[in-house]
Image (tube, grey):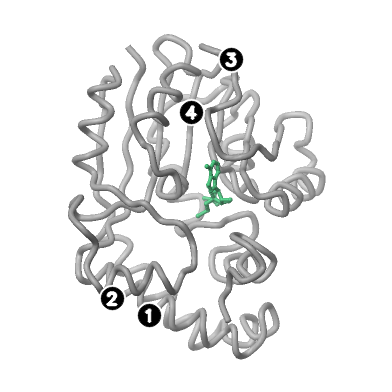
Amino acid sequence: MSLTDEGHYGPKQLNMLKTIWGEGNLSPGGTDEIDEILGDYDLSDKIVLDIGCGCGGAAFHMIEARNAGHVIGFDTEPLVIERANKLAIEKNVSNQVTFKCIPPGPLQFENETMDVVFSKEVFLHIIDKEELMRDVYRVLKPNGYLAVGDWMREDDNEPSEQMKEYIAAEGLDMFMCSIDKYREILEKTGFNIISMHDRNAWYLEKVKGEVAEIEGPLWDEVVKAIGPEEGAYALDIWKKLVGVVQKGEHRPGNFRALKN
Ligand SMILES: C[S@@+](CC[C@H](N)C(=O)[O-])C[C@H]1O[C@@H](n2cnc3c(N)ncnc32)[C@H](O)[C@@H]1O
């Protein structure tokens, strides 16, 4: 039994993540963390590409609170995009957002068409980060802005047994690299780095709180969303996650950069 036995980001996984992280979000931290990644950059009237947009939480925030002109979000999972489109209608922002389901591979967008490229907790699923970053550079307009949050690792050595056990429990493809590796790739690609932040300390407190909520006030909702057995399985994954974050091997982080 696994949260992903109906596919990556299938119905059970989506219902569980919605219960813990809120409507539209498939990653932790809500709008505060999206702003943390974006920084002060003025999104007014900008065209933003959201790589791995999930159910649209960040896209809606960029439109509603950050005044983005248009957000193009794409994701590899059809169900995720279906939910994002449904939420866009409910929020009455369908004219400012385009959600597309696109298979993994090179970015299917023309050269120099995006003012901003944003992504949150997606690059970990993409194995070739150099190729990805070259592609991001290609679609950005000159002086375009890149803002990324990702789940990273403390180094680029073989993951520990504890980490492997956590990744296996998740049942997802996870190819996490270090923040130093990202620095190297960004520089090699030609980006001017603005900032790079390690978020391990922040997430450690957060993820401990998430476990307490799953075990406590959210338990009934979790059971309603995915059933008691899967709920117990999900709780076990979250506890494994606390372990690798506490160990310091799992390190969420973010970076901002400008295209030269
Ligand atoms: C942890 S979720 C984050 C989603 C969203 N960014 C958020 O923060 O709510 C990761 C997302 O990446 C998507 N994904 C996985 N591989 C991808 C790829 N190669 N290109 C685009 N999206 C991908 C998954 O389907 C999933 O929706």
Q: Nearer the viewer, mark 3 or mark 1?
A: 3
Residue on which disc 3 sits: 110
**In the image, which disc is placed on residue 239?**
1
Precedes in sequence: disc 3 or disc 2? 3
Q: Residue at x 31, y 37 (%)?
A: 255
Q: Nearer the viewer, mark 3 or mark 4?
A: 3
Secondary element at image label 1: helix
Q: Where 223 falls versus 105 (above or below)?
A: below
Secondary element at image label 4: strand
The Cα atoms of the two marked residues, 2 and 1, are separated by 6 Å
Q: Position of residue 192 (x, y in %)?
A: 26, 20
Beta carbon at label 4 within 8 Å of ligand 1: no
Residue on which disc 2 sits: 243
Give the crowd class for mark 4: few <14, some 14-19, many >=20 residues within 10 Å: many
Beta carbon at label 1 within 8 Å of ligand 1: no
Precedes in sequence: disc 3 or disc 4? 3
The Cα atoms of the two marked residues, 1 and 4, are separated by 32 Å
Precedes in sequence: disc 4 or disc 2? 4
Answer whether labels 2 and 1 touch (C-beta < 8 Å): yes
- Identify the amino acid type marked 3: Glu
Answer whether labels 3 and 1 touch (C-beta < 8 Å): no
- Identify the amino acid type marked 4: Val
Secondary element at image label 2: helix
Is 44 in front, or is 233? 233
Residue on which disc 4 sits: 117
